[in-house]
Image: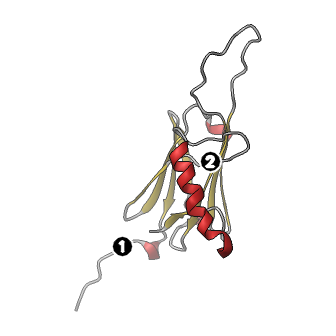
Amino acid sequence: MLLIPTRRTTRPALAPFNRLDRLFDDGFTGFPAFTTGNRVLAPATDISESDSAVTLTIELPGVLSQEVNVSLENDVLTIKAEKQRPTVESTDQVRCVERSFGKFERRFNVAKGIDVDGIEASQTDGVLTVVLPKSERARSRNIEVK
């Protein structure tokens, strides 16, 4: 696969804790995973691959496209955003809050077979789509046997 979700740390001594952290994140968070307190969580992501590209699909309900930051540095694609909690009138009494608010972040290691200059991102109806086109060398092709 040309796109691999990163783990929390690359330090070998802390690697065993990455799986434990992810287990807790997956087991105790709602949809999608946002912050609880000072803890940054990762929104759920679908990754699909075709002959010409790798596509990320991330659900970001309630997040405007101008609030999403997609960046690439040192072959790591980072998606960050913050969903702001709406202000409540001082006369309103909040009875229940089930929606999630706060910062979130997701990182992916990008393999050498991706054309980094051709990466595109768009957002429609709360769904972010990031298309990472494959370089010509990475695309599958049939080789004629002579």
Q: How is the image coloured?
A: secondary structure
Looking at the picture, tell me which residue is in the foreground, 17 or 90.
17
Q: Is residue 45 above or below residue 110?
A: above
Identify the residue shown where x is 51% and y is 59%: 132
- Mark 1 residue crowding within 10 angstroms, few (<14) / some (14–19) / many (20+): few
Residue at image mark 2: 41
Identify the residue shown where x is 56% and y is 56%: 22
Is label 1 in a helix, a strand or a loop? loop
Amino acid type at image mark 1: Ser
Identify the residue shown where x is 40% and y is 71%: 139
Looking at the picture, tell me which residue is in the foreground, 52 or 93.
93
Residue 6 visible in the shown view: no
Mark linked to residue 69: none
- Mark 2 residue crowding within 10 angstroms, few (<14) / some (14–19) / many (20+): many
Q: Is residue 48 above or below residue 144?
A: above
Identify the residue shown where x is 64% and y is 61%: 8
Looking at the picture, tell me which residue is in the foreground, 127 or 144.
127
Name the quadrant of the N terminus.
bottom left
Residue at image mark 1: 140
Residue 119 visible in the shown view: yes
Marks 1 and 2, how far apart at CA: 35 Å
Q: Earlier in the sequence, mark 1 or mark 2?
A: 2
Choose top left, top right, bottom left or bottom right for residue 14. Answer: bottom right
Is label 2 in a helix, a strand or a loop? loop
Mark 1 or 2, which is nearer the eye?
A: 2
Residue extending farthest to the right is: 90
Q: Give percent across and percent down for residue 38.
A: 73, 44
